[in-house]
Image (tube, coloured by chain):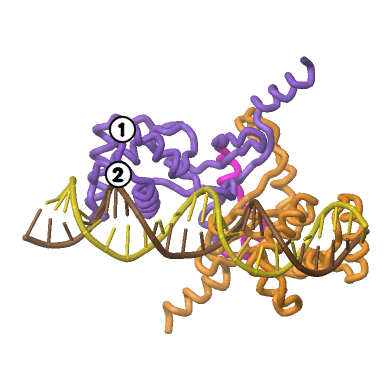
Chain colours: A purple, B orange, C yellow, D brown
Amino acid sequence: MTIVTTDKQQVAQLKDIFKRAGIKLTHQRLEVYSAMTSADDHPSAETIYLRLQKKIPTIALDTIYRTLTTFEELGLVKKLHLMGERTLFDANLHQHHHFVCNRCQAIHDIYWPEFDNSVLPDPADVMGLAHSRHIELRGVCTRCMEELDDQKKP
Amino acid sequence: MTIVTTDKQQVAQLKDIFKRAGIKLTHQRLEVYSAMTSADDHPSAETIYLRLQKKIPTIALDTIYRTLTTFEELGLVKKLHLMGERTLFDANLHQHHHFVCNRCQAIHDIYWPEFDNSVLPDPADVMGLAHSRHIELRGVCTRCMEELDDQKKP
DNA sequence: GTTAATGCAAACGGTTTGCAGGGGT
DNA sequence: ACCCCTGCAAACCGTTTGCATTAAC
């Protein structure tokens, strides 16, 4: 489900988006965006920071925060508030949901178009107009279940 | 959907629960529990703190945090991480979901047993065993929609 | 009387902000 | 040349923690 684009395409897209928004396309913003779209997990600001330090040793953590906030305002990334601790960021803009493993904290994407297109129950409909719907499943992931099984029979 | 119990029943229930857990039933814990079960919103620790200051002027905010954490470990309340900012607490233990108004930040409970009992899609099933499922709807509540309409036609 | 819970204050960690210098347009 | 963005450091705010006192058992 990952959108594969060449770097050149990404840069051209970004240049256009930033031009429309009237803000500058800096090296840091490019790298943060690249790190976000190439991430196959749901990184925190600090995770992006650590990953970029190899490429840009002088980058500052608050720049990551500012950049990701800018990206969110432009609709390039979404914030996730799953674990209650730090904010996570997601560059996957396709409608999807999340499975969180309570043991290893891994987060997996779930696609469920039948749910996305289903009609909300009456009580929810009366409450207002829902623009978005997000499911958070919590449990134990397959790998952790295997590890737990292995512990039982040594 | 609110469970109505008399104070005496609540105290008896709590005494039993705390005895089993081997911890003390203090005045503060009683009042926090009472404030939680009588709340018809989804209060933060600070909200509970402000509400209790009238009854217990010397109560401290960190006591609220400790108490609510204890309650959560006992399964008496649940933590909510909806808005990304502060943690909210919910004494409604019935399986339910939430509608968050993006305009006024109001949070409404949604009951949707058909969803709760529905079979998860294959991809989610492969990821692991889901113990809980929670939907977060976001949009504009009915009241805010009316207010927005009123602004349009003065 | 023993032990755990409270209140206070200080620490903590993630995030935000004020400011001066540097880089994009 | 202009102004925005960055890096640095300090502030910020919700939450947690160490410690002495107080209250529940």
Whether residue A33 is visible, yes or no, is yes
The residue under label 1 is which amino acid type? Lys
Between residue A80 and residue A13, name the one nearer to us: A80
The residue under label 2 is which amino acid type? Arg
- Residue A29 badge: 2
Image side of residue B148 versus residue A114, left or right: left
Mark 2 and mark 1: span between their CA atoms?
A: 13 Å
Q: Residue at x 42, y 77 (%)?
A: B152
Q: Which residue is mark 1?
A: A55
Name the spot of residue A117 as percent of width and height, x first.
Answer: 56, 46
Q: Residues within 10 Å of mark 2 (few under 14, many from 20)?
A: some
Q: Is residue A127 magenta?
A: yes
Picture quadrant of residue C9: bottom right
In the rendered image, the vertical position of residue A111 relative to residue C21, given as above or below: above
Q: Residue at x 73, y 25 (%)?
A: A148
Whether residue A75 is visible, yes or no, is no
Q: Residue at x 59, y 67 (%)?
A: B106
